[in-house]
Image (cartoon, rainbow, N blue to C red):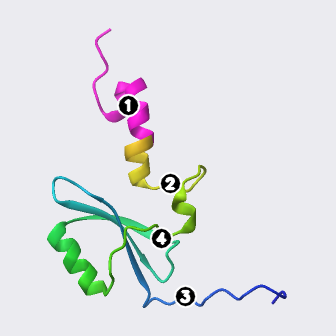
Amino acid sequence: MVCGMQAPAPFDPARRFVRIVEERPDGMVEFHFAVGEPELFVEMMLPRTAFEEFCAHQGVQPSRDGLLPAESGGEGQSWTLHDARTQRLDRHAITDPGAAGQEPPPA
């Protein structure tokens, strides 16, 4: 070990993380779920009741804070499917109607 550097914490599968991304008007809750390390998460969506049951079963208290310090913005590979849907695809849908599955205007 190099002086001044701490050894990384061991992987602990008992640590669970849930971050609410969006509560949609249709009652669905979009969220990130991580086991052991917040850096590795899956994006999930459940109805509100099922989400509450999921959190209780996993023993986690949902948060609205980012799981990672890097989630504060930036480019590169620090984006999620939610970001792609709400920021990147919506931006392209304006300039390219076919990008969002819409029919292009007649020629």
How many angstroms separate mark 1 from mark 4 (CA)? 29 Å
Q: Which residue is mark 2?
A: 79
Q: Helix or strand or loop: what does disc 1 sit on?
A: helix
- Does the CB distance between marks 3 and 2 fall below 8 Å? no
Q: Nearer the viewer, mark 4 or mark 3?
A: 4
Q: Earlier in the sequence, mark 2 or mark 1?
A: 2
How many angstroms separate mark 2 from mark 4 (CA)? 13 Å
Q: Earlier in the sequence, mark 4 or mark 3?
A: 3
- For the point 15% across and 72% down, the residue is 49
**Amino acid type assigned to the residue bearing label 1 in the image:** Ala
Magenta region, mostly helix, strand or loop? helix
Q: Residue 9: x, y in percent? A: 61, 88
Q: Helix or strand or loop: what does disc 4 sit on?
A: loop
Q: Which residues are magenta?
A: 88-107
Q: Residues within 10 Å of mark 4 (few under 14, many from 20)?
A: many
Q: Which residue is mark 4?
A: 67
Q: Which residue is mark 3?
A: 11
How many angstroms separate mark 2 from mark 1 (CA)? 18 Å
Q: Helix or strand or loop: what does disc 3 sit on?
A: loop
Q: Residue 82: x, y in percent? A: 38, 53
- Is residue 102 part of the magenta span, yes or no? yes
The image quadrant where one finds the N terminus is: bottom right
- For the point 77% across and 85% down, the residue is 5
- For the point 52% across and 61% down, the residue is 71
